[in-house]
Image (tube, helix red, strand yellow):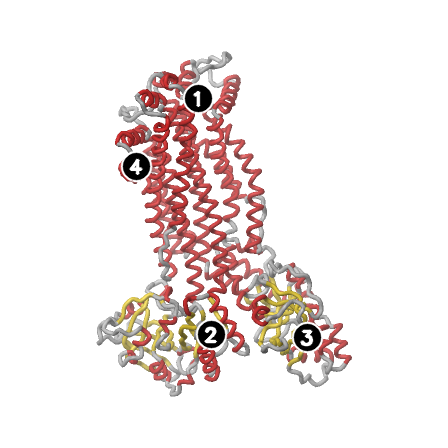
Amino acid sequence: MSYNSDLPVITRSSGLSCRLFGYFVKRSFGEIINKKCYYFISLASCFLAIYIALVANTIISQAPLIFLKIGEIENGEIDVFLEPAQMSIDRYLNMSKVDILIKHEFGSLAPRLFFGCAINKIGYETINLNLTSIDTERERTQRIGTKYDLPVLKEGECAIHKSLSDYHHIKEGDRIELRIFIKEYLDILYEIYKPKGPPLNLRNIIASCEISHILNDLGGKVARDYEDTTVLMELKYFDKFLAKQLDMLPSDFREFLTNFNPHYVVSMILANHPNRGYVYSDSDGYRIQGTIAAYVDSIVTKLGYYPVKANMPILKNIILFNMGVMFLSIILNLIVIVLAAISTFLIYSLLTISVESRTFEFGLMRMLGTGKLGLTVLVLVQAVMFVLPAFTLAILLSYPGLSFASHLTEENFGLSFSAVPSFYAVIWAIGIGIFVPLIAAILPIKEVLTRNLVESLDVSRSKSRGVHITIEYEKKSSTWTTFGFGIIVILYGLSIYYLLPLSIMAMNAELMLWIMLSILLTIVIGLIMLSLNITHLIERALVFIFLFYESSAMKFLVLKNMVAHKLRNRRTIIIYALSLSFLLLTITAYTTELRNIEMTMQSKFPSKLDVSWPHGWPTYPIIAKIEALLEELKDEVEDFGWMSETLASHYRGRFKKTWVTDYGRQVYLKIKHSAITPNYFSVAEEGLFELSTKNKTSGLRLGEQLYTPRGTQGVGIGSFIEGLIKVDVEDPKTTFLLYYEKDTTTLLFDSRPIFTLDSCPGLMMTYNDYMGILAQDVIMSIPLFMKVANISSLSSIRWKHLVIKIKDDDIKSYGKVVKELRRNLSSDDISIWNYYQGIDQIESIKYLLDLIFIFIIILFMFLSFFSLSSSMTANILDQSKEIAIVRSIGLNKTRTMLMHVYEAFILVLTGSVTGAFIGMIIAYTLSIQRMLYSSLPIHFEFPYVHLLTMIVTSLICALLSTISPSLYLLKKPISELARM
């Protein structure tokens, strides 16, 4: 190794001169030229760490938008619906007056007109739909329907959904007739035109409309369930359109309609928060609630509390999924923290390997008089040489990365964000890019200063060590490591001791989740550190399992290599184990959360296809019509059942309070009674059904047991009630009381528990004490329900849900049955829940999250590859003398290279097995924890595909990390290897 003759010779007391500092910079540039591969690995590692901090933090701040999209499935892209209040005399609003009152302080609010209508295309049946007149320009300024890209519809034009056109064979350019139910609207217009005149006696009109556009998606204009029953028209041309259709009315009134401002009479006014993306990207649903509520309150204050009422359905969904919003945000933030930790460990590993590979150079510099300060500056200069370019490059490339992420977010969610890194992300980047390398350089500097000078200058010995002996003197032994670790543990324990009760007392769910997930993270780290004590056993087992075909000599060489490089390989094992375990933890976390969201949406309804009556109940003729229709659809429908309204809600005049209590009257719990048909549980969704206990002497299905002699004396209850009133299903003598309070009397019924459930779709039946504070459902047979309600006719029962089970769970069959139900029941106020109509949005969200996590997996694998590559390069270069010996005794080049490939393979596999096992344990714990919060049967789903992908990628990295350094040494003659 040669050195420049201009190396300044200084004494240890002379300090650090500018000339010496310039020499260090010059030597660092020379080191870059000589070791381009090492410099590239260091630069790429630091760049990835900083880039992740900039991009990931900015993107993660937008994660709650996922839950906004879920809310938009059921309600459209609308934050606020302003409607006439119930106490208001008028059923319409004056948009022009609203504009004057608010003076456009909140932007141009968007008015709409709604009408029921019957659409009739000649030769096809008549169906009932909703005619919606929209103000396209105003809704575009409010960002209502971000994917709706049609121009303003012309007079007499309308747009419909593709499913409606397919079912009724309607094409673009066809003309259809609309029977519009418009009596109240025309009466108001006529009163404005002629206040003292008699009202118009016109209930509906027939209007001809041209289908100008058929859309695959209405772009968020309306809720997903109503897209195939909506006809869109333009509001500003609607009155002119009416005027041309009303030939039977006086010409002067039609002239009035032609010139009438349609904003004077509107059904509803829509509004979106101006900073919608920023507001809904908050991880705390209650802060979102406060912001949106303040925005709505400012509008209502201007318009008046009594004339209007505000409905905020998306906000209700956000509050419903508030725990999920916080949970996912915290998980994603933990990813950034762990990536920062891995980046720190990786940079430390790179600096350590650099120091170890330059032992002779540092020893020579120490011999020539360079002091501790000079060597410290040399290592820091070397770190800065790849930190500054990496930081600059990461800042520049973060803009296109964020632009792509913003474009992807706008395509999927209709909300974009700035391509400039957030302030929080920049702080993270500065910390990781500048302070992390400085912190990571501490131990390598200590290694330089404490290394024995004689050993540093001895080039005749091999650098590989199988045995390490450390001698410590009592007076000189350092306890700073133990002391520092103790301080960290004490601070961590104190924070948990203080913050956990604080989060419980303050009901701060976000802080509580942070604490719980940080505990999980420390468990992961603790298990990894614990597993380091048995890695040699894992390595030995893996060698004999996967290298079973190799000779004993090759196995022996691989194991000895693992022992010789144990300390250096330990860093790589830690990185791989931490990466895989945490990836499995986070993948399971977001999969569990999406499953929880899906099941929360589904748990509101008994089955995947449910028909309900939100503002009433079906009469007996309608029930007969529905059952006849379902019999005709027996090729698609396997079975169907009914569930009644609750006893108190439909017999409010008779029952004020309904309770369940024990005979000692010590415990009272509010309950809701419903009657079910015998086949209810065979029709309801099985995935949400969890049985606790039942009568084992009966072979009947649960619903059928309610119709036995014993069943007509009993009810089905939740496990929470069972534990609260201390009843035993298997004891035939066990009874409890059903307590009913009326206006003047109190009724008590003896009842038996027929079965108990941990969960039941469409009903609140739980085992969880946390959910037990809510009113629990009790189900009974129809005869018992009639007896309690004191009704004598089956037709008097008011049914709440029609539960339908489709054969083979076929998606096309769901669509067909839904269309037939809508067509035949279009005149009724019904709500149809089709599981597969909303699940596609969940799937699109899962697809987007999968893309994000694939990107994260790639980042983790890159970081792990850099660590593995640097470790294997150092291992192979340090073994130059050993390679010369085995080559000289007959081991050929191929077998020598294969030996190092085996070492890297076993090294990666050891870290992967350790990480997978730890990740599986913690992920299972996490899924159980989430199930306790939600009281839903969320089953643990292990991400086998992701794990296999990570292991295969790691093994490829193991192969790539050994080829280059092995070829570099194997090209040299044996004599030269022995002198290296």
The alpha-carbon separation of the residues under discs 4 and 3 comes to 79 Å
Observer-nearest residue: 667 or 949?
Answer: 949
Can you say which quadrant of the picture contains the C terminus?
top left
Q: Locate residue 181 relative to residue 816 in the image: left or right.
A: right
Residue on which disc 1 sits: 375
The numbered mark at residue 612 is 2
Question: Which amino acid does the dot numbered 2 rest on?
Answer: Ser
Contact between marks 2 and 3 (CB within 8 A): the answer is no
Q: Residues within 10 Å of mark 4 (few under 14, many from 20)?
A: some
Which residue is farthest bottom? 792
Give the foreground label among 4 and 3: 4
The alpha-carbon separation of the residues under discs 2 and 3 comes to 33 Å
The numbered mark at residue 547 is 4
Reading the chain from its start, which is encountered first: label 2 or label 3? 3
Contact between marks 1 and 2 (CB within 8 A): the answer is no
Reading the chain from its start, which is encountered first: label 1 or label 2? 1
Contact between marks 4 and 1 (CB within 8 A): the answer is no
The alpha-carbon separation of the residues under discs 4 and 1 comes to 44 Å
Element class at badge 3: strand
Instruction: Name the spot of residue 973 as percent of width and height, x first.
Output: 39, 19
Give the foreground label among 2 and 3: 3
Instruction: Name the spot of residue 49 as percent of width and height, x first.
Output: 48, 38
Residue 468 falls in image quadrant: top left
Q: Locate residue 68 relative to residue 966 in the image: left or right.
A: right
Question: Which amino acid does the dot numbered 4 rest on?
Answer: Leu
Can you say which quadrant of the picture contains the N terminus?
top left
Q: Locate residue 485 relative to residue 275 in the image: left or right.
A: left
Observer-nearest residue: 134 or 492?
Answer: 134
Residue 801 falls in image quadrant: bottom left
Q: Residue at x 45, y 20 (%)?
A: 374
The numbered mark at residue 208 is 3
The alpha-carbon separation of the residues under discs 3 and 1 comes to 88 Å
